[in-house]
Amino acid sequence: MRQSSSPAAPTATAGPYAERLGLPWWAWPLGLATAGLLAVELWMGATGVRAWLPFVLLIPAAAAALWWLGRIRVEVRDGELRVDDAHLPVRYVADVVPLDAAGRREVLGVGSDPLAFVVQRPWIGGAVQVVLDDPADPTPFWVVSTRHPVQLATALLAARDAG
């Protein structure tokens, strides 16, 4: 189900927006326990370097991988939408549509546009679809995961209207 971003829709307070698309809390113990189990499987009673090397390598590698998965930041500031390293000036934003899980599935489903810019995290249910109005850019829209789609849409539209 899509939600409208029309001016008549109720909106939250506008202002700068920042969010980190981190992993849920349960992913950390699960990932570290999996790395520990794999280290135990590799150790299996060995002596010498094989006794401690799997633990020294796999557990920090799992922690680094978990951190890397949750590193993406979504921000609206200085007249731009920033998603990780990508920057979109808000003057090119035509409309912003907050999406729930079903709306995100519809936008990214079978009929999705292959030229769309997508930053999607499966553990985050909401998203926004940012429709672009830039004749020099073939990208029709951005789809960005967010835990607060209405607040992000409001911040984007407020930044566009202020600029």
Image (cartoon, rainbow, N blue to C red):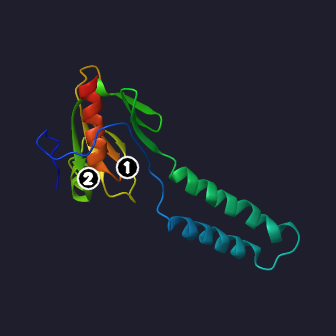
Q: Is residue 160 left or right of residue 40?
A: left
Front residue of this view, candidates 126 and 15: 15
- Residue 104: image tag: 2
Residue at image mark 1: 120
Do the numbered discs 1 and 2 sit on residues whose CB atoms are within 8 Å?
A: yes
The kind of residue tagged 2 is: Arg
Q: Residue at x 34, y 44 (%)?
A: 144
Front residue of this view, candidates 122 and 41: 122
The kind of residue tagged 1 is: Gln
Q: Earlier in the sequence, mark 1 or mark 2?
A: 2
Q: Quadrant of the C terminus?
A: top left
Residue 83 horizontal/vertical position (percent): 42, 38
Q: Is residue 130 left or right of residue 31?
A: left
Residue 77 horizontal/vertical position (percent): 40, 32
Q: Residue at x 70, y 70 (%)?
A: 39
SS of the residue under disc 2 = helix
Residue 123 horizontal/vertical position (percent): 40, 60
Q: Residues within 10 Å of mark 2 (few under 14, many from 20)?
A: many
Farthest residue in the front direction? 13
Can residue 160 be seen here? The reply is: yes
- Residue 137: image tag: none
